[in-house]
Image: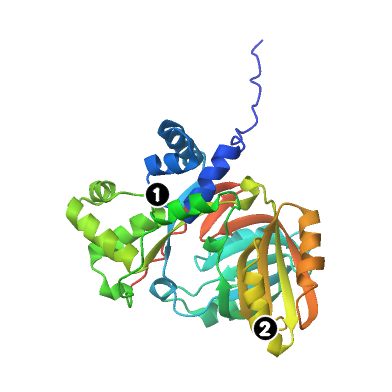
Amino acid sequence: MTAVPTLQPPSRPAAMDETDLDIVAALQHAPRVPANALAEILDEPTSTITRRLNRLQRERLVRVIGRFAWPLVTSGNPRQLWFRCTPGRAPDVAEALKAIPEIQFLLLTTGSADIYADLFPLHGTDIDELLTRTIPSIPGVASTESQLVLESQRVGQSWRLQRLSDEQQAALQTYVIPVNRPPIGGLEDLSDVEVRIMAELGANARISAAEAARQLGISSSSAYRGMQLLLGSGAVSPRVEVEPAAAGFPLNAIISLQLKPRSIAGVLEELSGQKSARMVSMVTGKASVIYNGVFSGPAELAHFITEEIGALPGVQSMDTCVGLSVLRRYWMDRDGVLIGNQVEGLLRR
């Protein structure tokens, strides 16, 4: 009798320990810091830092990518979308939304909405067609609400793990590439080679000029000049992608605040300084300000709502949606805490 093979559960990534979290925290301050310098700052052997960083990237727990300057990839301000779905159809609607390259962030939620999404109008996008025909016609969509982002006081790359000393942060700052060149007006101002280098930096912001040269079949000097131009002008800003749940912050909450007009500026400034903040925006619609934050659990969220939100002036009403699962963050699909590849087609001339 032939033995029936035992089905093994899918492998799960090892949990991050204290050293892993220190590495992530350091990279959040200086994404391109060399491994030997990182080892010295964290007081660990270089071999340990190199092995740990390779594992974190290989197991898709951490990626160091390049954030493109918004004017180079988008044709207008982003929209925040809220979806109510027919019963049982929210996962299907979310999968359909993942097929739309303009969807930058996608979250299944509980509360007043079933799905929350950030939409960025990439160059060449017919935003009216997307918002009035394509998205509302997705099977399972019962209703949508769209809000125009007027101002973003805080963006995702500003979120930091609070783990490092002031001395360590200062040491890491010396490895941050300064933005000291004029900004690039548009992709048409770049050569084909520079756009290709930009795509490489977008996928891996720790890539060296020699590695980029090998992959693109160009000289190391051309790769170096292109990287200096793109990084020095702010066309590409290195950033660390780690799903907050993997770092001990599994609860994603989006809080909508309706405020008295004179209170909006002060509330934006106050909320942008909160350690849980990933995105703080002034928007159109019923809400004045949207706060997207990550928390260690319900107790921390409850404290934030009662103590921090409760102390803000001018709050007239509040609505909170709690995330069930993040399906896409910064144009990279997620499988739990695992990070997928970046959506193609962001660089359009």
Q: Position of residue 119 (x, y in %)?
A: 56, 71
- Lateral position of residue 10 relative to residue 314, left or right: left
Nearer to us in this view, 92 or 44: 44
Is any atom of residue 158 visible in this view?
yes
Give the distance between the C-alpha atoms of the residues marked 2 and 1, in whole angstroms: 37 Å
Question: Disc 2 marks which residue?
Answer: 264
The image quadrant where one finds the N terminus is top right
- Lateral position of residue 184 relative to residue 344, left or right: left
> Measured along the vertical axis of the image, is residue 264 above or below residue 159?
below
Specify the amino acid type for callout 1: Val
Question: Disc 1 marks which residue?
Answer: 33
Residue sitting farthest toward the top: 1
The image quadrant where one finds the C terminus is bottom left
- Lateral position of residue 303 relative to residue 25, left or right: right
- The residue lying at 64 percent from left, 27 percent from top is 8
Nearer to us in this view, 280 or 1: 280
Specify the amino acid type for callout 2: Ile
> Measured along the vertical axis of the image, is residue 308 above or below residue 57?
below
Q: Secondary structure at mark 1?
A: loop
Q: Secondary structure at mark 2?
A: helix
